[in-house]
Amino acid sequence: LKWKNGLSSLVMRKSENIDYIMSVVLAKCPKIFIHRDYTSGMVVRFQTKLPQELVGRIDEQLFEKCIQTVNEMFARAEKLTWKSLFENIIGCFTCYLSHLCMEYQFSRVRK
């Protein structure tokens, strides 16, 4: 992914079964916010309702499918598996293990 002055984003488009990337300068584009869907609690999901700013600019079914795909990606990322459990245990263990190797600033300041 290439960034120009930190102002551009890469937008994926699909046209006639050919994938291509188009750079869009974010500073010149209006921002559209997709609201979170809290119906399932704190699970990361976005509402599939088409924002008013996009009505007439994008097909509603295409937008809904795109948001559903993003929601499915978040669901897979947050799914609890043995591998993710192991990664979290190792992360916690190594973090607390570092307390044996070094003294933290908070402890030094208290002395």
Image (cartoon, rainbow, N blue to C red):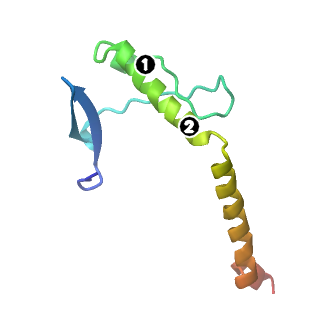
At label 2, counting other C-alpha atoms closer than 10 Å, the crowd grade (few under 14, some 14-19, many 20 or more) is few
Query: Where 85 sits versus 46, above or below?
Result: below
* Residue at screen point 38% across, 20% down: 63
> Which image quarter: residue 9?
top left
Q: Mark 1 near mark 2, Cβ–Cβ under 8 Å? A: no
Dot 1: element: helix
Q: Position of residue 40 (x, y in %)?
A: 67, 25
In the image, taking residue 81 as reference, residue 20 lies left or right, namely left
Is residue 70 in view from this perspective?
A: yes
Residue that lies at the very extreme toward the front in this rendered image: 82
Q: Residues within 10 Å of mark 1 (few under 14, many from 20)?
A: some
Q: Give the total number of marks visible in the rendering.
A: 2
For image coordinates 18% across by 23% down, the residue present is 16
x and y percent of residue 57 in the render?
28, 17
Would residue 26 be visible to someone looking at this image? no
Placement of 104 over or under 15, stated as above or below: below
Residue 40 bears which disc, if any? none
Vertical placement of residue 80 versus 97, above or below: above
In front: 52, or 61?
Answer: 61
Q: Which residue is mark 2?
A: 76
Write down the quadrant of residue 36 in the picture. Answer: top right
Amino acid under disc 2:
Arg
Secondary-structure class at tag 2: helix
Q: CA distance from mark 1 to mark 2?
A: 18 Å
Q: If you read the primary sequence from the N terminus, does the residue marked by circle 1 or circle 2 appear first?
A: 1
- Which residue carries the number 1 mark? 64
Residue drawn at (43%, 19%) of the image: 64
- The amino acid sitting under disc 1 is Glu
Residue 29 at x, y = what percent? 27, 35
Place of residue 27 in the rendered image (x, y in percent of width and height, measured from the top left) = 28, 43
